[in-house]
Amino acid sequence: MNRAAFLGLLLLAHCSSPPETEVPRPSDGADPFDIPIDTATKQQVTQFLKGDNFFDVPFREPDGLGPLYIRIACSSCHTEASKGPGLVQKMVVLNADGTPSGDQSTLPFGHTVRPQVAAGATTPILPPGDPAVKTTIRVGPSVLGRGYLEAVDDSEIERVAEEQANRTDAIAGHVNRVVYTSEANPDSTFGAHANGDLLIGRFGLKARIATLDDFTADALQGDMGITNPLRPTELPNPDGLTDDAKPGVDVDADFLNDIANYLRLIAIPARRGLTDEGRQLFERVTCGVCHAPSLRTRADYPIAQLRSIDAPIYSDLLLHDMGVQLSDGIADGQANWRQWKTTPLIGLRFARSYLHDGRAGSIEEAIRMHASSGSEAGGAVRLFNALSDSERQTLIDFVSAL
């Protein structure tokens, strides 16, 4: 059963089920993803489908696209909520020794390349012709199961960080405490956050954003030039434009929150083929220290199905030093130039490339690249290399099934 057929099943269930009954999952061996959480109610399925539709909407100039932009739709970077195929180019000024320069004035409009123009703009933001500027890419991460990440209790993230601080090996993750820079969301269902609040970051490759509504607002503004109540101003641009072809804010809070609620309701895809032997090897080589199999969620999270559960996200949501070779030279919040958030291993079996820039073409290659110079994961890679061939394959099969 493909995704379109499964969504048709959801619509049929929505039309025929009694009020607030759970929507049945497929029982025919189908392997759908980008679908609602288990036991989703009719109301939640309606929310999911509405937000999913908006997630796929391509913006045009009359809709407020631009003046600078990267992509025209959310799904351009996260097709069916999975990793890629869209990517973002980043740039940073480096010193001769490869460390970030203290002078980034060569990049007056920041570290993000915005190559597309609209609504009267004529000058894109492109890498300057300066050999000191390093250009890298970031593949759009999967957004599967992101409601589980938002539901994780702050105290859980802090607990894991404290436990790692007491380890005797190199692993020591850090919480990225970020300043909330958006405006308050008119809908405070998922938090009444005010500009300037200090929150725990958990979204983005460096955990620079704390909530899914802010994640959505940031992507609309930064990737498509779509202003919204949380991010109501156009980003600075070389042409000095302060608006686009649609005067004022481009989308309202309802539109933004519909997309955010869709993200909250996306299921963690069913995992098939996980073995006890693979799980034991995952722990033995210390993969499970950073890729924590589960974290406890809040008792008061607004989505009832995600309250007080062990969310199987396979991430500690902490920042880790991943070494020189995996660095892109860019700091973000309290994340330094070599740190990345532990990627949640959700829907990994649907991925075709791995790591933040897609440089790894296989799970094994991604594991070995964790041995980047100075990486906290170097010891784990040595333990992986010490396994027998059959044990390594068992571990790879386990990770591939997540």
Image (spheres, rainbow, N blue to C red):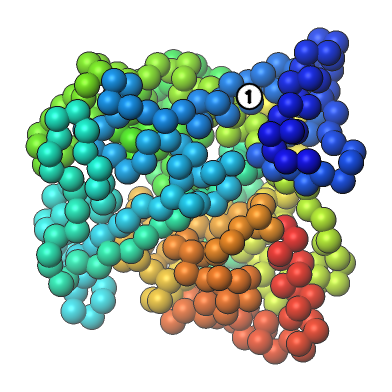
User: What x and y, as percent, mark residue 61?
Assistant: 28, 26
- Asked whether residue 26 appears in the rendered view, the answer is yes
Q: Quadrant of the N terminus?
A: top right
Label 1 amino acid? Leu
Element assignment for label 1: helix
User: What x and y, as percent, mark residue 156?
Assistant: 64, 48
Q: Quadrant of the C terminus?
A: bottom right
Q: Is residue 371 left or right of residue 309?
A: left
Q: Quadrant of residue 105?
A: bottom left
- Asked whether residue 162 appears in the rendered view, the answer is no
Q: Is residue 241 left or right of residue 232?
A: left
Q: Nearer the viewer, residue 139 or 294?
A: 139
Q: Nearer the viewer, residue 98 or 62?
A: 62
Point 29% across, 39% down: residue:
69
User: What x and y, as percent, mark residue 113?
Assistant: 26, 51
The residue tagged 1 is: 49
